[in-house]
């Protein structure tokens, strides 16, 4: 089954906007979440500052990732497991210098099929700390957005709702939104964090208006370290007829 599926997954990854592929890379092993004031007279959690870390060349995050891949045509499923590493670098495109988010995916299916891919996203960060996407890599080069799109608004706060429409030069469109639902304490291999719980959904369409992808995720975001410490996501690819259900947990960061 997976010889063909590997090609399909790699084709999907090559056309996926990095800002939610990053999200898709934060989803796996189930770790205990300790909610606010859950019995025993615990004091309410103090919200994080909400201001995103200033990203610099050399920053990195590593995640343990696992989940399932389901072929929608046959109904067959396989488990996947591995890691995702995100590194911050910089690059010049059309005479302008941007930060680059480099994502390296390295997972293996239950049947032993390795899937490895490296992708690049151009990003910028404004004075408030908000992180915006400028464009994403494709086999032909960077597909730039007509206007930058917010990845994370800073400062983040409970109740915040952000909507976005990303129009790429290629004609592809990404429409989505996220809502900050609350704060929770999360334990992952990298440590214990007080995080914002964020629910997000998005849809990607081609230049003809046909739906290519849909995504729904829950992320636990810690702005002070620059992103999510845990994420659960379901991604459906309508063109290649498969669904990925993934969980990712932060292992290391700097």
Image (cartoon, grey):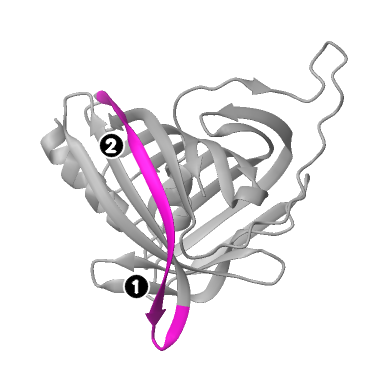
Q: Residue furthest bottom?
A: 95
Along the viewing direction, whichever of 88 and 9 lies nearer the viewer: 88
Q: Earlier in the sequence, mark 1 or mark 2?
A: 2
Q: What residue sits 38% from the left and 81% below the top?
A: 93
Q: What residue sits 87% from the left and 24% below the top?
A: 43
Tag shown at residue 107? 2
Instruction: State which region is magenta.
Output: 77-97
Along the viewing direction, whichever of 227 and 199 lies nearer the viewer: 227
Q: Position of residue 22 (x, y in %)?
A: 45, 49
Q: Is residue 82 above or below residue 38?
A: below
Is the Cβ of the residue at disc 1 closer than 8 Å to that at disc 2?
no
Tag shown at residue 142? 1
Q: Dominant secondary structure of the magenta stretch?
A: strand
The answer to whether 85 appears left or right of 115 in the picture is right
Q: Is residue 136 above or below residue 22?
A: below
Along the viewing direction, whichever of 225 and 235 lies nearer the viewer: 225
Instruction: Label 1, secondary structure: give it.
Output: strand
Q: Position of residue 139 (x, y in %)?
A: 23, 66
């Amino acid at each position: 089954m997976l010889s063909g599926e590997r090609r399909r997954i790699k084709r999907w990854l090559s056309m996926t906007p990095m800002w939610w592929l990053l999200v898709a890379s934060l989803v796996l092993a189930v770790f205990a979440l300790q909610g606010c004031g859950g019995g025993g007279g615990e004091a309410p959690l103090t919200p994080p500052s909400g201001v995103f870390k200033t990203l610099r060349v050399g920053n990195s995050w590593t995640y343990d990732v696992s989940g399932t891949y389901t072929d929608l045509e046959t109904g067959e499923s396989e488990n996947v497991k591995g890691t995702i590493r995100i590194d911050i670098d910089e690059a010049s495109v059309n005479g302008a210098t941007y930060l680059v988010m480099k994502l390296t995916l390295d997972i293996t299916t239950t049947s032993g099929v390795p899937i490895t891919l490296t992708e690049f996203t151009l990003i910028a960060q404004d004075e408030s700390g908000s992180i915006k996407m400028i464009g994403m890599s494709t086999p032909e080069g960077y597909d730039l957005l007509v206007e930058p799109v917010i990845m994370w608004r800073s400062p983040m706060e409970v109740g915040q709702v952000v909507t976005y429409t990303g129009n790429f030069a290629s004609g592809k469109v990404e429409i989505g939104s996220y809502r900050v639902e609350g704060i929770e304490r999360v334990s992952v291999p990298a440590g214990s964090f007080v995080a914002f719980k964020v629910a997000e959904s998005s849809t990607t369409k081609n230049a003809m208006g046909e739906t290519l992808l849909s995504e729904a995720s829950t992320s636990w975001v810690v702005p002070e370290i620059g992103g999510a410490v845990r994420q659960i996501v379901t991604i459906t690819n309508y063109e290649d007829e498969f669904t990925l259900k993934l969980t990712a947990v932060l292992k290391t960061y700097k």
